[in-house]
Image (spheres, rainbow, N blue to C red):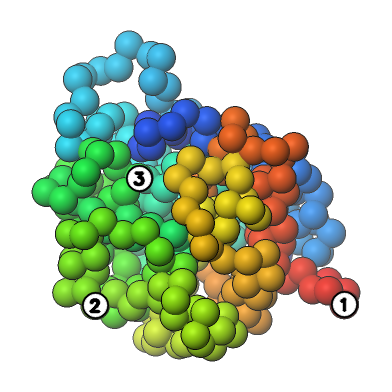
Amino acid sequence: MVEFSEIAIIGVPQDLGASRRGVDMGPSAMRVAELSEKIARLGYDVIDYGNLHCHDIDEDLKEESSDKLRFLSEIMDTCLHLKQEVKYIIDRNQFPLILGGDHSISIGTLAGVKAAGKQKVGIIWVDAHGDFNTPLTTPTGNIHGMPFAVLTGRGDERLLRIGPSPTVREENAVLIAARDLDREEAESLRSSGVTVFTMRMIDEMGMAKVATEALRIATMGVDHLHVSFDIDALDPEEAPGTGTRVNGGLTYREGHLLMEIIHESGVLSSLELVEVNPTLDVRNKTARLAVDLISSALGKKILGS
């Protein structure tokens, strides 16, 4: 992790990008799981900026949603506000820790990184899914299935303008833990410059080798490394509280090893943890796991901190 003394937390309680309700409560669940307290024990000063205002499905929404881009205007509004908040944090030399919410918020996070002057950005995207759909390929119209594509410059022009995209370097973009890709999405990933480590590859290579290689790819020639961690990368036995569960995911130790190796690289510059859904959880187990993963990325170790 890059040297920071202050960790700045922003909650983004948005669930309009997903089909299932509940991820809007994810930031609160992670705070209840003692996020700030555990980070402070690692020696950081913690500044919690609270939650961004996000639109709710129960509002009188401004316009009818497109079948291919559901709740586009509301999601754009959230991402534009998040862009400004992330820029503010980076300008103050604080470490941005973003709590979702659904994964569509990443469009705003990386737009903020770019607005802060980071032009060569690498990304490690930890997710069971590719999130590489566009309006031409999406089977659902849910924008949380599109942000990785948007970050690399693919998709609807209105979403691309938020960054403006691309906001990450495709040759420095890595997807880890993939195991549930739509057919056309998989074809798009194969023809892109994105490196994909599927769960089979993790089984065969081991997480230590995958993490080391991912870091090598994601950090070549960059001035900022962002990690975007969707909790559904973990196996549902470990993380039941998420809306798009897929069997055969990362184990508890694989998830922690990845985050520990990322921390030890000394180059992590921003982090987001998304898709925690307390309405599907068991005694806040998934939120506690999310907090522990964040702690590992920030330097928690078995023998001392």
Q: Where the C terminus falls, by quadrant?
A: bottom right
Asked which secondary structure carries label 1, the reply is loop
Task: Read off the residue under disc 1.
Answer: 303
- Quadrant in the picture for residue 125: bottom left
At label 1, which amino acid type do we have? Leu
Q: CA distance from mark 3 to mark 2?
A: 21 Å
x, y percentage for residue 298? 68, 67
Residue 249, x across and y down, in percent? 53, 63
Q: Secondary structure at mark 2?
A: loop
Residue wearing tag 2: 193
Name the residue nearer the viewer: 134 or 6. 134
In the rendered image, the residue lying farthest to the right is 304
Q: Is residue 301 visible?
A: yes
Quick check: can you spot residue 210? no
Image height check: is 181 above or below 121? Answer: above
Going 33% across and 35% down the picture, which residue do you hit? Answer: 75
- Residue 123, quarter of the rendered image: bottom left
Looking at the image, which residue sits at the far front? 247
Residue at 52% of width from left, 63% of height from top? 248
